[in-house]
Image (cartoon, rainbow, N blue to C red):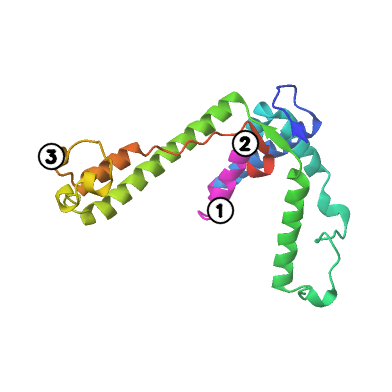
Amino acid sequence: MRLASTSRMMSTHTTATIAAAKANAAAAEKLLPFLDAALKPWAESQTQHLKDVEMWASKYPAVTEEICKRKAANPLAAGIVATTAESRAPSTCKYTVEGTLIHNVMKKFYQDARFETFILDGIEITFTPEDKADMQAQMDSMSSELHTRMVGVIRSELAPVMPATDPSMAKTKPPAEMYPGYSGPSMETFLKTPPTSGKDHLEEQLKELEPMKMEFPDKMPVSAVL
């Protein structure tokens, strides 16, 4: 399901979701002065949740409406739902005793996983030019930082063990003796060339390295974003 980011008036499910988020944020704000320090982040997260929903509704109204509509359908109220694509032999299943802590934890875990799959599966988001440019800038910055760190590691690890100079041509046979018919520069030319340090060779190679180039896509599954 491909949903574009064209702007339009918010639909019913989005409006209801924002209204609920506003009510939660207002209630949390009233409670904030009386909450323990450990609970204050929860109260503050309600305000952030409201801002996130409003931002998505503004930039990606179609995607937001589809997600809110699916959430309103309450997939967890459907009763018993299969957790595997195909039936499994009971002997291969792992069971927990109903009412125990592990049973409740695993039940909640699978419910949340099923809920997320129901809400997000099949929805594709097409990014606004502004968001794509922002993501591309972040990727370029990360690539540049990684490149700088990689070059630094190579230089610190290899430079100390590089040979002082390259093997001298004087220690080898003249090219004419090694390759019959050789007509390149004379041996004297090679011998007059100053020796090059291994570190210089390393620096030349490092200068040729460039940060990896990656292009941020125009669209992707919404499950990869949320």
Q: Which residue is mark 1?
A: 39
Q: Is residue 213 above or below residue 179?
A: above
Residue on which the image places disc 3: 188
Residue 126: tell me if it is visible: yes
Cα distance between the residues tagged 2 and 3? 73 Å
- The quarter of the rendered structure image containing the C terminus is top right
Residue kind at label 3, given as amino acid type: Glu
For the point 31% across and 42% down, the residue is 205
Q: Amino acid at mark 1?
A: Leu
SS state under label 1: loop
Residue at image position (23%, 57%) is: 161
Q: Is residue 14 above or below residue 146?
A: above
Look at the numbered disc 2 and give the secondary structure of its residue. Answer: helix
Q: Quadrant of residue 125?
A: top right
Q: Residues within 10 Å of mark 1 (few under 14, many from 20)?
A: few
Rendered location of residue 212, percent (x, y): 45, 39
Of residue 109 and residue 170, the one placed in the foreground of this image is 170
Q: Marks 1 and 2: in contact by CB < 8 Å?
A: no
- Name the residue beneath numbered marker 2: 52
Residue stretch rendered in magenta on the structure: 33-50
Residue 95 appears at what percent x and percent y? 77, 74
- Give the Cα distance between marks 2 and 1: 20 Å
Say whether marks 2 and 3 touch (CB < 8 Å): no
Residue farthest front in this picture: 181
Q: Residue at x 79, y 28 (%)?
A: 11
Distance in Å between CA atoms under marks 3 and 1: 81 Å
Q: Looking at the image, is mark 3 or mark 1 nearer the viewer?
A: 3
- Give x and y (percent) for residue 92: 79, 75
- The disc placed on residue 21 is none
Q: Specify the quadrant that holds the N terminus.
A: top right
Callout in the foreground (2, 3): 3
Q: Is 130 in the magenta?
A: no
